[in-house]
Amino acid sequence: MTSLTQAPEAPTSTARTGRSVRAGRLARLTPYGLVGPAVIAFAAVLGYPLVRLVWLSVQDFGPRSLFTGEAPFVGLGNFTRVLGDGDFWAVLLRTLVVSVACVVSLMVLGFLLASLLRLVSNWARVMLSVCLVLVWAMPMVSASMIWRWLFEPQYGVLNWVITQLGVFGDFSAHDWFSSPGQALFLIIALIVWKGLPFVALTLYAAMGQIPDDLYEAAGLDGAGRWSTARHVTLPILGPVLAVLVLLEVIWSVNSFTPFWVLTQGGPDGGTTTLGVYSYLEAFTRNDYGGGAAIAIVTVVLLAVLAVLYVRRLFAQGEVTA
């Protein structure tokens, strides 16, 4: 008698192969599907302004163009004029000096502060972390205004404190922003003070991932704190430090608010960096094409620096794909 039920027919090898191919294709496309919405949103938000900036940089766009809507195409004329200006190279050098000073100070102080967070008691760690977060959360405009008040010549707190101490003489009317050197120092200090919480808390979180066994082994080998930091902590923190350095370089070069609020690029252009220089060229001299060209040069310099830096990190094995 023929059985009423039959076992399901086993799938053929061709069907299995087709499902495997589809599964493999889906697995390869899944990351692009996950990243795709973010890329689309990023392109929509920044794509048009960037394209508009590039187009503006190759036009002779001045005050007259705002009313007539006509802006002659000049090609690379704005770039040639900007790169041929001696002021641009002085501003570029000043921007590099400020960026190096900010990044080095942030990395050194951030590492020391992160190490301190690991050594203090729990309540001290909580209080210090709260203070860091409050500094980090403060808008840069507010921080710059507070900084301006602290160093105000007539009513500034710092001048009053120094005068009361009597060690450096009478500072009751000292103008810290009348000298380019002093003004740059204060701006760098403000940038470091504002960016220190991000670096310190990031390094502290990264230090928490280092196994205690490594420190115990270093202690058994007779390594001191400096030797342990040099041969254990810093090598493990290498990838995190690499990302922090790149981010801080970008943020330092693009920093605009502290320079503008405190000095507006003065005195005599002594605190003018690329961001301020681009703004002055566009909105003070009304050369919008020249200002756009300076902004494009800044973007290209940062992009080249980022690519070279990341390639070097890959070559040294600091980061892996």
Image (tube, rainbow, N blue to C red):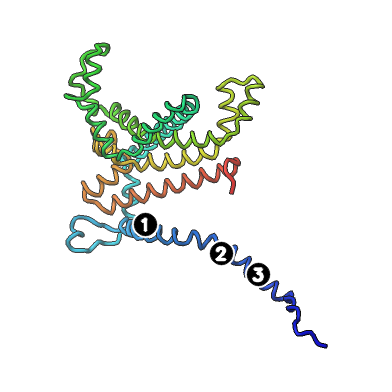
Label 2 sits on a secondary structure element that is helix
Q: If you read the primary sequence from the N terminus, does the residue marked by circle 3 or circle 1 appear first? A: 3
- Quadrant position of residue 249: top left
Q: Residue at x 59, y 25 (%)?
A: 228
Which label sits in the foreground, 2 or 1? Answer: 2
Amino acid tagged 1: Leu
Label 1 sits on a secondary structure element that is helix
Please give the count of numbered marks on the rendered protein: 3
Amino acid tagged 3: Val
Where 268 sits versus 277, above or below? Answer: above
Identify residue for label 2: 29
| Residue 280 point in image, percent of width and height | 25, 44
Identify residue for label 3: 21
| Residue 122 point in image, percent of width and height | 46, 28
Identify residue for label 1: 46
Residue ranking furthest to the right: 1
Q: If you read the primary sequence from the N terminus, does the residue marked by circle 3 or circle 2 appear first? A: 3
Q: Nearer the viewer, residue 171 or 304?
A: 171
Q: If you read the primary sequence from the N terminus, does the residue marked by circle 2 or circle 1 appear first? A: 2
Q: Residue at x 50, y 47 (%)?
A: 307
